[in-house]
Image (cartoon, rainbow, N blue to C red):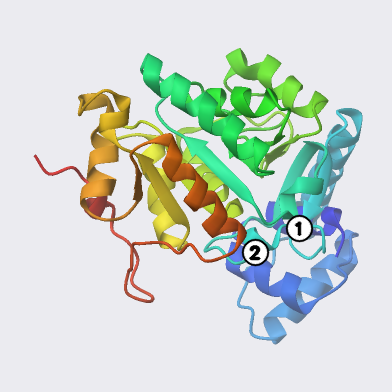
Amino acid sequence: MNSLSVLILLQIPKFKRKQIERVLNNYTTLPTNSLKLHDFLNDLNNNDYDILVPSYETINSVIENAQKIIKECKSSNILIMNYSENIFPQDLKIIPYPPLLLYYKGNIKYINKTHKVAVIGTRTPSPLGKSISKKLGLMFALKGFTIVSGLALGCDTYGHLGSLEKPGNNIAILPCGINNIYPTKNIKLANKIIENGGCLISEYPPNIKSKSQYFILRDRLQSGLVSLVAVIESDINGGTMHTAKFALEQSKILICISPNLLGGADLSNRGNSLLIKNKMAIALTNFKDIEPIVEGILKNTLKPIFKQKEKEPLKYEQLKFKL
């Protein structure tokens, strides 16, 4: 199914994502004119889809809006891939609440490579946190890993900067439209990622601004796309712990910098302490530890240390720090 068709489905009012996912799994084509689309939606109801079929006027508006988005993407050199295409990352198809469309700019070839790592942490890291983020970014790049981030300030940024010293492969996932980069302070970094063969990814159309819920939704893609999440420095609140939660739910390998390596336990690394104490993450106590971790991933022998009961979602309360 082409991306215009998927975009049309996503624009239809009250058409649930689960229903759209079901359509994508069962149909290869979709009509893109209002009369035939109206009939198609009615046929879906006859096949037990239980959807609210909109009026012809609404369908016309939906199609026009989808076409405008496609046109805007072309003028901004933004490409689109959808859930039904082979290029669509398999890692994201298997996560809960998968994205159905991804917009991207740059070289997408690394998105389906096996070895990807998220280097994440606070937006206001300590000097040691900055240094460690950059060093790990470079170390992973030298081993052939693609660095994945949310293009956030702080640890995410320094992880990319370390990787780009090689230069390594980089992917940044945005909580907004690709031509509306947030944070604006990282526009130069975003351009550098593209110039060095990496790419920017978003599930939002051009011109969409970031919203608070978009950051959490982005975090599920960041952890979903990688085999390893490396927490550099984090307090108990904020996006880093959301990404850690998603990584645990998705059974990804989670490693965490020991507070001792950051100069001692502190408010800025209470999240690190929590993850290590609850045996949710592998503690990185010195840089020599990274070698067996990398080898374990490359040989597929390293497994997550956190075991959660099957089909039982991880509660956010489990990530709350207990004083």
Q: Secondary structure at mark 2?
A: helix
Q: Quadrant of residue 278?
A: bottom left
Q: Which mark is residue 88?
A: 1
Three-letter amino acid code at disc 2? Lys
Q: Nearer the viewer, residue 26 or 308?
A: 308
Tags 2 and 1 touching, CB below 8 Å:
yes
* Camera sees residue 103: yes
**Image position of 197 (left or right of 154):** right
Q: Looking at numbered disc 1 in the image, what kind of residue is underneath it? A: Phe
Image position, residue 8 (x, y; %): 78, 55
Instruction: List the residue tagged with mark 2.
Output: 93
Mark nearer the N terminus (2 vs 1): 1
Q: Which residue is depicted at the point 81% across and 74% down?
A: 40
Q: Is residue 156 visible?
A: no
- How crowded pointer 1 is (Cα within 10 Å; few <14, some 14-19, many 20+) is rated as many
**SS category of the residue bearing label 1:** loop
Which sits in the foreground, 76 or 318? 318
Q: Position of residue 234 (x, y in %)?
A: 33, 32
In the image, residue 146 sits, relative to residue 282, either above or below, namely above
Residue 217 appears left or right of 205: left
Structural distance between the alpha carbons of marks 2 and 1: 8 Å
